């Protein structure tokens, strides 16, 4: 087994990992959380096996999909590494899955063996070898590459005690934190399955009947936007004033109690309008970001029953705030769930790709700050212009603001109903079909259409997450 070097902080601070046990121990620090039901692939560079890009994908439930998924993952990791400047010299594969009730880790390992082989074959087809392929299940790990039973026995090797390795010490020194398991992170963003789900569904039905028709109306759309942002700000302030518990479950339950069904439904429906959602995204930094993230998570949990697709908007906002504040693992989880709720949600797709490519969120923050400044300046001008119209002296020849001058003169008609010819009509040639000017086609500008809900794609978590080592 080759040694691998993993940076944990500054470029000159590295940790050398020797053997499968230390690789498995390093995995939560590489991703920022403990993966569950996941394929994880890490690129290695140079003779020392320096960690590079990494990729995570939920294990497909259907084994028929494994060959195609393996090929796509291998291409994604290799091509992504090449775009960042270096083709990987090798890859390490992890298959992480807990056994079902009554099952064992060894059974999981044997069931996933064909998937490991397909991943090794797909990487080899791209001339990038898999140095190690490990299965992690039920507190133990197995190697798919080592045939020596002396170091890799059939019953597997036990995992080390968490937090006792050199990697854990270096990560703690560098300020790298593990946020729990992937399942725990997703639970904070998943719609309710217990509690008063029926009451929340009724509130969403009522809000949908009253708010969606107003969004489709030009004047009502602006009113809904202002009401949505005002309600969201009121809720965010309420959450900011409340004390938070240390445990995630207790903190989320406390936040849920501070938001009524009707308030949650009104904001969820209002965020379905793209321009309103973009205004909500402006709360992305500074002291307001933490309470905004709590609000978007709480609203995602309220998209119960047939309204699950509407969670794409609050989930995307949660992912954006997490990314903007430096929490890339949390951002990937939220954006992945947004794409699971609505695979065609463009804002989530763009943010997910940008986060995986290691781009700087500051560019988007600059755009949102500029839009906020321009909107506030426009809102400040409107009362002044309206006051100027009211106080201006009456002038019969003065046109009100916004009224255009007629584009052509209307000639008086004669008694027979025909327009009187102009004096120079006799000197002008009649327009032929080739020279007669055509009228421009004018159609109404449509607003955001009502988002559909109901049918959704079924399946497992197939949102790939890739990127550079944080």
Image: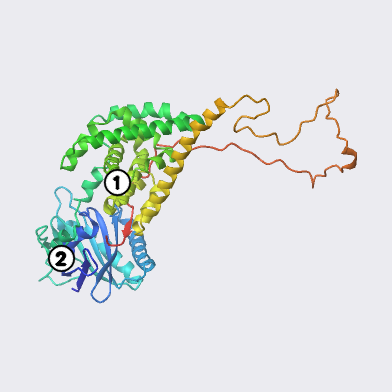
Above or below: residue 159 compared with residue 121: above
Above or below: residue 43 compared with residue 264: below
Q: Quadrant of the N terminus?
A: bottom left
Q: Position of residue 95 (x, y in %)?
A: 23, 59
Q: Position of residue 131 (x, y in %)?
A: 24, 71
121 or 326, which is in the foreground? 326
Snapshot quadrant of residue 81 = bottom left
Q: Position of residue 250 (x, y in %)?
A: 17, 38
Q: Position of residue 436 (x, y in %)?
A: 78, 43
Q: CA distance from mark 1 to mark 2?
A: 37 Å
Residue ID at (40%, 51%):
366
447 or 208, which is in the foreground? 447
Q: Which mark is residue 286?
A: 1
Above or below: residue 214 compared with residue 141: above
228 or 298, which is in the foreground? 228
Q: Which residue is mark 2?
A: 22
Q: Reading the chain from its start, which is encountered first: label 1 or label 2?
A: 2
Judging from the image, what secondary structure is the residue with disc 2 in?
helix
Q: Quadrant of the C terminus?
A: bottom left
Above or below: residue 348 compared with residue 29: above
| Residue 318 showing in the rendered view | yes
Judging from the image, what secondary structure is the residue with disc 1 in?
loop
Residue ID at (21%, 38%):
252
Snapshot quadrant of residue 261 = top left
Badge 2: how crowded within 10 Å, few (<14), some, or many (20+)?
Answer: some
Between marks 1 and 2 in the image, the one whose residue lies nearer the viewer: 1
């Amino acid at each position: 087994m080759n040694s691998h070097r993993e940076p944990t902080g500054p470029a000159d601070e590295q940790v050398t990992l020797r053997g499968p046990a230390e690789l498995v121990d390093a995995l939560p620090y590489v991703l920022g959380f403990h993966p569950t039901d996941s394929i994880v692939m890490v690129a290695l560079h140079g003779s020392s096996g320096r960690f590079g890009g990494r990729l995570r994908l939920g294990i497909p439930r259907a084994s028929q999909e494994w060959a195609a998924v393996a090929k796509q993952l291998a291409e994604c990791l290799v091509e992504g590494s090449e775009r960042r400047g270096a083709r990987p010299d090798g890859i390490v594969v992890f298959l992480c899955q807990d056994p079902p009730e009554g099952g064992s880790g060894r059974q999981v390992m044997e069931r996933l063996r064909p998937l490991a082989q397909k991943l090794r074959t797909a990487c080899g087809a791209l001339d990038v070898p898999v140095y190690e392929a490990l299965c992690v299940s039920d507190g133990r790990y197995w190697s798919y590459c080592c045939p020596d039973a002396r170091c890799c026995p059939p019953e597997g090797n036990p995992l080390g005690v968490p937090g006792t390795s050199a990697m854990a010490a270096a990560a703690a020194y560098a300020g790298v934190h593990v946020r729990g398991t992937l399942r725990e992170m997703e639970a904070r963003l998943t719609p309710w399955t217990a509690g008063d789900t029926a009451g929340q569904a009724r509130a969403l039905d009522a809000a949908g009947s009253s708010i969606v028709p107003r969004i489709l109306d030009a004047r009502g759309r602006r009113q809904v936007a202002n009401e949505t942002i005002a309600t969201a700000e009121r809720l965010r302030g309420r959450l900011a004033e409340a004390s938070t518990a240390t445990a995630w479950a207790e903190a989320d339950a406390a936040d849920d109690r501070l938001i009524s069904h009707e308030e949650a439904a009104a904001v969820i429906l209002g965020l379905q309008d793209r321009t309103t959602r973009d205004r909500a995204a402006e709360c992305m930094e500074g002291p307001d970001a933490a309470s905004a993230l709590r609000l978007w998570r709480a609203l995602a949990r309220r998209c119960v029953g047939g309204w699950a697709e509407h969670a794409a908007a609050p989930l995307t906002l949660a992912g954006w705030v997490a990314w903007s504040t430096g929490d890339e693992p949390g951002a990937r989880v939220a954006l992945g769930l947004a794409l699971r709720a609505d695979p065609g949600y463009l804002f989530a797709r763009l943010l997910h790709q940008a986060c995986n490519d290691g781009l700087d969120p500051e560019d988007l923050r600059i755009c949102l700050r500029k839009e906020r400044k321009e909107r506030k300046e426009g809102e400040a001008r409107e009362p002044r212009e309206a006051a100027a119209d009211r106080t201006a002296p009456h002038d019969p020849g003065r046109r009100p603001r916004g009224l255009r001058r007629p584009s052509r003169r209307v000639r008086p008609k004669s008694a027979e109903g025909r327009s009187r010819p102009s004096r120079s009509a006799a000197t002008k040639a009649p327009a032929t079909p080739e020279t007669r000017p055509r009228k421009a086609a004018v159609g109404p500008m449509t607003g955001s259409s009502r988002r559909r809900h109901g049918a959704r794609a079924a399946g497992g978590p197939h949102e790939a997450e890739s990127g550079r080592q944080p």
